Image (cartoon, grey):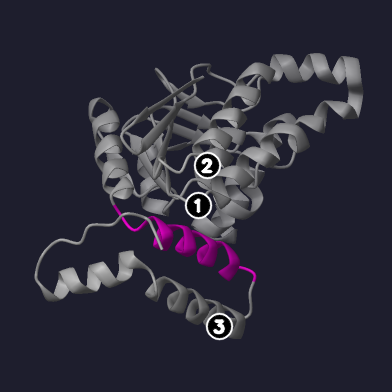
């Protein structure tokens, strides 16, 4: 696991094909660090080589099953659930740059990010039912929200692998690029996000997350409340002034 910051963009790179204990701990620490650094205004999550991440290290899991039985699943509360929560609730945009295989909890991690770009040739699968499990890492909800319940049911129950082109057509990713262009495209998108209205991004993330379960009156009331709060920020006032003056706004992510 590596963590680097360039300007206002933090990049978290998963350097192992699957997530063993050390990798999960380092990934959680990196997500926590990025979330707490006010100088970071956008985050990129990616992998190395031909693998974004295949999710849980099954050798480690098999050892844990033999040694601890049902306690082997304590990793959900200790690692995966905090990871997903950290990505989803982070008050800044997170971009998944999916360089290769994205499976199991790896797909859950990608779907917990706000934006997803994939390299041509990347492969996806939910994987869980293939080993007799139901999804974790929020996948049962995030995949259904991305593709609808009918397709999510097929992808989860049948555990059929799918391509990056499928992921694009189904709305799982927003952009598909040649593998050699992935890193540069991710940097370009993340740099643009880092220069954008951070407070508005954070509020939009929360609104999107809450809207799935909220009744319409609550959605409308929350939107009105959030718009009023953002309308009082320097970012908004400056952007309106810039629009009227026919110049590009400069966002500083401040109230």
Q: Which mark is residue 35?
A: 2
Left or right, residue 74 beside residue 98:
right
Query: Mark 2, mark 3: which one is toward the viewer?
Result: 2
Distance of label 1 from label 2 (alpha carbons)? 7 Å
Q: Compared to 221, does 133 lie above or below?
A: above
Where residue 163 sits in the image (x, y, percent)?
Answer: 41, 37
- Precedes in sequence: disc 1 or disc 3: 1
Q: Residue at x 72, y 29 (%)?
A: 131
Distance of label 2 from label 3 (alpha carbons)? 27 Å
Left or right, residue 128 beside residue 252:
right
**Image quarter for residue 45?**
top left
Q: Which residues are magenta?
A: 196-213
Where residue 246 sits in the image (x, y, percent)?
Answer: 9, 70
The residue to which callout 1 is attached is 91
Mark 1 nearby-residue class (10 Å; few <14, some 14–19, many ≥20) = many
Where residue 141 sits in the image (x, y, percent)?
Answer: 63, 54
The residue to which callout 3 is attached is 221
Where residue 61 sits in the image (x, y, percent)?
Answer: 75, 20
Q: Residue at x 49, y 35 (%)?
A: 124
Q: Compared to 57, does 42 lie above or below?
A: below
- Precedes in sequence: disc 1 or disc 2: 2
């Amino acid at each position: 696991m590596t963590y680097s910051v360039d300007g206002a963009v933090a990049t978290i790179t998963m350097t192992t094909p699957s997530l063993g204990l050390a990798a999960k701990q380092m990934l959680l620490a990196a997500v926590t660090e990025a979330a707490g650094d006010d100088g970071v205004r956008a985050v990129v999550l990616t992998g190395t080589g031909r693998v974004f991440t295949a999710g849980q290290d099954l050798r480690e899991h098999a050892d844990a099953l033999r040694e601890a039985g049902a306690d082997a699943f304590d990793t959900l509360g200790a690692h995966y659930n905090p990871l997903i929560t950290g990505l989803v609730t982070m008050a800044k945009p997170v971009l998944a740059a999916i360089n290769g295989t994205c499976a199991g909890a790896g797909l859950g991690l990608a779907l917990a990010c706000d934006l997803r770009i994939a390299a041509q040739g990347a492969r996806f699968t939910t994987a869980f039912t293939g080993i007799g499990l139901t999804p974790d890492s929020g996948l049962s909800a995030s995949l259904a929200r991305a593709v609808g319940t009918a397709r999510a049911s097929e992808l989860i129950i049948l555990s059929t692998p799918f391509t990056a082109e499928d992921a694009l057509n189904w709305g799982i990713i927003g952009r598909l690029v040649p593998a050699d262009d992935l890193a540069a495209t991710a940097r370009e998108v993340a740099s643009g996000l880092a220069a954008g209205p951070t407070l508005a991004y954070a509020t939009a993330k929360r609104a999107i997350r809450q809207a799935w379960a909220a009744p319409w009156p609550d959605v409308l009331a929350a939107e009105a409340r959030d718009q009023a709060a953002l309308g009082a920020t320097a970012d908004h006032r400056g952007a309106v002034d810039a629009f009227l003056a026919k110049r590009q706004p400069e966002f500083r992510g401040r109230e």
